[in-house]
Structures are given as C-alpha cells and as structure tokens.
Image: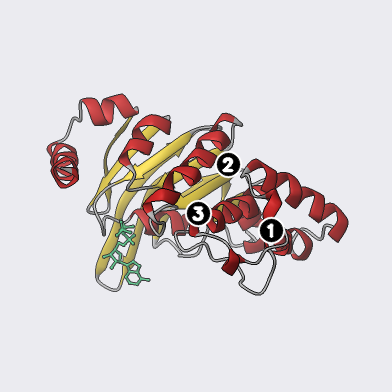
Amino acid sequence: MLDINDLHKTYGDNHVLKGVSLSVRKGELVSIIGPSGSGKSTLLRCCNRMEHASSGQILVEGQDINAADAKLDKLRQRIGMVFQAFNLYPHLSVRDNVTLALRKVKKIPRAQANEIAERALTRVGMAHKADAYPGQLSGGQQQRVGIARSIALEPAIILFDEPTSALDPEMVDGVLQVMRELRETGITMVVVTHEMAFARAASDSVVFMDGGVVVEAGTPDELFGAPKHARTTAFLSRLGSEAH
Ligand SMILES: Nc1ncnc2c1ncn2[C@@H]1O[C@H](COP(=O)(O)OP(=O)(O)OP(=O)(O)O)[C@@H](O)[C@H]1O
C-alpha cells in the first residue's frame, strides 16, 4: 500500500530525514511516535507532496508519488491528510467543507456530493451538524469534520498529523474513538501521535523515530513492552516520568 524507501529530506544544512524506510500494508493502522523534531511531520508531508523529498522513493499502491507526471490533485484524493489544526474553511458550512473537493476536484454533482458527505459525517457522528459553521463547533467536532472530509474522498490511505494535539483533553477521546472505528472498517491509516495509550491500543504496528531515522518498529507489545533500543527505552521512560 505505502512503501517508503531510503527517504532523505534536508532544509538547508538541516538533514531532517536521514534515510527513512517504512512499509504499511492495506488496512493497517501504523502509529509513528518519537521526540519533538525527530522528523515525523516532515515524513507525512513528503508522503502527500506538501514537501518534496530530497531523495528516496515513496510508492502508494506501487505508484511513485514523485514521478514527474503525478498530478497533485489526483494524488491528494488517494492520500488523505488530517491536520492538527483542522484547516476547515470558516465561511463554509460543515456540509460544504466536506463536499468542496468532491465537487471541485472529483467533479461530482452537488446532490450526489451531499449524499456522500452525509454518509461521511454519519460515520464520524457529525451528520446533525451539517448546516453548522466551523466556528460553532468544538475543536473535537471540527476535527471529526476534518476526518469526514478526508474519508469522503475514499483515499487509499489517510495520514494523520497529531490529530488530537490541538484539542482540549476532554475532546481527545471522541476523536480517537472515531479513528478506532475507521480502523475497524479497513481504512489504511498512518498516525503521528503523542497519545501513547492510543498508539499502544489501536495500532497494528508502531514506529519509533528519533533524529530523522526509524530507530525501531514493531507490534505495540514489542515496542512498548520490550523495546530493543536504548533510545526507545529512554524516550518511553521519559514519557512515563512526565506522566507521573
Ligand atoms: N518548512 C521547514 N523549513 C525548515 N525546517 C523545517 C521545516 N519543517 C520542519 N523543519 C525542521 O525539521 C525538523 C523536524 O521537524 P518535524 O516537524 O518533522 O518534527 P516532528 O517530529 O514532527 O516534531 P513535533 O513532534 O514537535 O511535531 C525540525 O528541526 C524542524 O525545525
């Protein structure tokens, strides 16, 4: 589904990704964890070409996303992205936020786009707010609309960049619950997260990044229960002590 091979990214002389390789199978939920500045967001942003990798290869369903003829619009229909900061249009209703790309990019007629939006909003428990505007919603509700906007396009994979980091604590669980439910429906997801309980409970595999490399990857039990590398152990124990 997603195959990343020896990916490098530099900003000036800042070598942010230093040869990242990663494979995600269809239907998997992969969490990426690691300290601030380790390159997690940059990796996701390279995957939907918000950033251009300096070298290396990213294949989605076997297709090289950096190929010269890869069209950005088409690419971003297949690789959805959910951001920390929701990125909804404040002047559009919830329904129109969800239908915008369906109508403008996929050229789906409005009535049909509205039906698709209704289904997507139902899946995230937000159908009753279709006529509301983002400013009338809580952060957690806005993020669920952001997720609906992404799933409405039926992407091959959805990348989540710290989807709960901007939320008040009481909003976090609702969003994580929606993501767990999506996993049950077989959507392939890569989630950059600081929510260790979620990463441990909901992932098929967990990737620990530090200093621009994948230090280790494994099942949640392997990575959290018996980390192989001292850097992973140090990161997890630092988090543990911060939590107390
Ligand atoms: N557009 C940019 N221009 C220059 N440097 C950047 C840019 N984006 C990221 N960086 C640098 O890349 C490094 C990795 O950043 P990135 O946001 O990918 O880390 P992260 O692991 O996602 O961190 P966090 O958990 O804090 O979000 C940092 O040193 C950052 O300063």
Q: Which of the two labelled residues, at mark 1 and mark 3, occupies the earlier sequence position?
A: 1
The total of numbered circles placed on residues is 3
Report the disc number at residue 140.
3
Residue in the image at 61% along x and 31% along y: 185
Residue in the image at 58% along x and 51% along y: 147
Coordinates of residue 102 in the picture (x, y in percent): 75, 58
Whether residue 182 sits left or right of residue 102 in the image: it is left
Coordinates of residue 207 in the picture (x, y in percent): 33, 39
Q: Nearer the viewer, mark 2 or mark 3?
A: 3
Local crowd size for mark 1, using a 10 Å CA cut-off: few (<14), some (14–19), many (≥20): many
Whether residue 65 can be seen here: no
Asked if disc 2 and disc 3 are in contact, CB closer than 8 Å, the reply is no
Residue in the image at 63% along x and 44% along y: 125
Local crowd size for mark 2, using a 10 Å CA cut-off: few (<14), some (14–19), many (≥20): few
Quarter holding the N terminus is top right
**Ligand 1 sits in quadrant:** bottom left
Quarter holding the C terminus is top left
Q: Nearer the viewer, mark 1 or mark 2?
A: 1
Whether residue 2 sits left or right of residue 169 in the image: it is right
Residue with the mark numbered 1:
98
Residue with the mark numbered 2:
62
Q: Which of the two labelled residues, at mark 2 and mark 3, occupies the earlier sequence position?
A: 2
> Label 3 is placed on what type of residue?
Gly
Task: In the rendered view, tell whether residue 45 sits above or below residue 243.
Answer: below
